[in-house]
Image: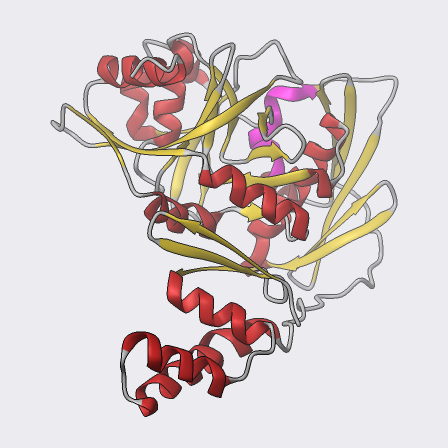
Amino acid sequence: MSEIIRRNIEEKSVVWFSVTNKYIVLEQKTSDILLQLNNGVSIETISRELESEFQIPPHDAIDFVHKINHEIHIPNTTNKKLEPDHGSEYNIPPFYNTKLYGVNDQVFKVQFQSEFEEYLIHPKFSHLELNASDKSDHTFQVFTENNVTFLIIDGAFIGSWPREEIHYFQGKFSMYMVQFMHNKPEDEWMGIFHASGLGNNEKSLLLLGDSGNGKSTSLAILQANGLTCLADDFVPMDIEKKHVYTFPSAISIKRNSLETLLPMYPELEHTAEFHFKRLNKIVRFLPPKTNQPNHNLPCNDLVFIKYEKNSGLNFEQISKIDAFQQLIPDSWISDKKENVEVFLDWFSNTNCYKLTYSENDKMVSTIKNLLKNDL
């Protein structure tokens, strides 16, 4: 019997499968049948119960149970898919450049084989660069062989990723920085969210939205209006407190946001631009402004935000199930069973909103009031 965890949210069930580390939203009756199958109850027994409960023909009942078994239960409880092995054999090459980054009271030394590897990491952390240091707490080595990029940390092989999976490499690099800077190993993190995390002195919230919706621009506007940027694009949340923690990568600012942001951040006018061809975007990077590197705050509000010209302001509560289905695909959630339970309990108690705006002042006021529990 494989591990399955279920939480009923609104009128649906969210089901997690340990074998595939997959979340599926189902009708509650379907999830009941799924759990019966996983507990070894026969298809015939379940079908008879279904036939009696809903007064349906026997063949319809058994067909329905067979379908759940073959399309959902079996694929997610057997034949665990192995992660592809891109190779752990390597030769340490000469390194083209070495950078030192200061985070909290730690120094990270990062050795890059070429400009390609440096471009994957340095732009978002350039504001943390140190000219020199008498120490380095951790050494990251990044190099590429046969279009596969390798990550070695403190002499230990961490992983390797082909070019089409390079965003997984960037995520793993950041995950180790988070672990070191907050002194929490991976299994003490509930998840990493592709969002913007911001807060006041008492609580935080997550801003979410598809690329192009203006999430990072909204974060920059809110930071200019006195709120704290905890993290952008890579937002860590721990298991123990269920708090959002700081991550010091810079906020990415697209060209079309400069007109709005330059009055707030005149330094952006002379900030270097970076062209990310894979993402087809040209951005500048704005450092987060926080003097509390270990800052962490509780979070129970998710806001799906979008800038839309001439929309005024529309703020409304949305279905948690709709929010969940948007949150999960871009998030890393710990696959440890106990952590999954904490995550589902946390999400069940969140408030989910949609905010569409064209007027910055009204957007700022709404977010500040939400953080003050004043809506």
> Where does residue 188 sit, x and y in percent of width and height?
71, 38
Q: Quadrant of residue 78?
A: bottom right
Q: Quadrant of residue 226?
A: top left
Q: Is residue 22 above or below residue 239?
A: below
Q: Is residue 78 above or below residue 299?
A: below
Residues shaded magenta = 121-129
> Which residue lies at the image location 41% right of the left edge and 78% below the top edge?
49
> Which one is in front, 12 or 47?
47
> Where does residue 190 sit, x and y in percent of width and height?
62, 40
> Where does residue 245 sit, x and y in percent of width and height?
60, 25
Q: Does any portion of residue 27 appear in the rendered image?
A: no
Q: Quadrant of the N terminus?
A: bottom right
**Left or right relative to 192: residue 223:** left
**Left or right relative to 232: residue 92:** right
Please identify the dominant SS of the magenta region: helix
Q: Is residue 307 above or below residue 227?
A: below
The residue sitting at the bottom extreme is 59
Is 269 magenta? The answer is no
**Left or right relative to 163: residue 63:** left
Q: Does any portion of residue 85 appear in the rendered image?
A: yes
> Which residue lies at the image location 87% right of the left edge and 21% below the top edge?
135
